[in-house]
Image (tube, rainbow, N blue to C red):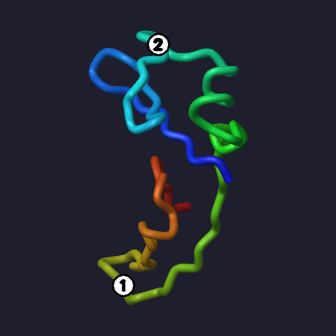
């Protein structure tokens, strides 16, 4: 498997080849550069929303309502951007 490196520093996109950093572009590189210089599979960029249902435990009451609790493993779901309870 090829070893690719494509990074962005403060002003440029660069790759690491032959023990040196090579500047590829100063703006977001086109798809062909990502494929040839930085990524072997662009499918990892196709991120879609995922709905995960999780059971909650009834932990008692609070006034006239009920209290439920559940733990979310943030190491398992790294890219959580929204949580809602229904």
Asked whether 59 or 43 is in front, the reply is 43
Q: Quadrant of the C terminus?
A: bottom right
**What's the residue at 52%, 80% (across, down)?**
56
Q: Is residue 46 above or below residue 61?
A: above
Label annotation for residue 52 = none
Q: Quadrant of the N terminus?
A: bottom right
Circle 2 residues within 10 Å: few <14, some 14–19, many ≥20: some
Q: Is residue 17 above or below residue 29?
A: below
**What's the residue at 49%, 56% (across, down)?**
84
Q: Which residue is mark 2?
A: 25
Q: Residue 39, image x and y in percent?
A: 62, 38
Disc 1 and disc 2: Cα gap in Å?
A: 59 Å
Q: Secondary structure at mark 2?
A: strand
Residue 47 figure quarter: top right
Is residue 7 rendered to the left or right of residue 50?
left
Q: Which of the two labelled residues, at mark 1 and mark 2, occupies the earlier sequence position?
A: 2
Q: Which residue is mark 1?
A: 61
Asked whether 9 or 17 is in front, the reply is 17
């Amino acid at each position: 498997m090829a070893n690719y490196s494509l990074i962005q520093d403060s002003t440029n996109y660069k790759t690491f080849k032959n023990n040196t950093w090579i500047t590829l572009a100063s703006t977001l590189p086109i798809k062909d550069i990502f494929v040839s210089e930085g990524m072997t599979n662009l499918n990892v960029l196709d991120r879609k929303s995922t709905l995960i249902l999780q059971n909650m435990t009834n932990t008692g009451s609070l006034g006239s309502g009920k209290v439920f609790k559940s733990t979310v493993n943030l190491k398992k779901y790294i890219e959580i951007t929204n949580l809602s309870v229904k």
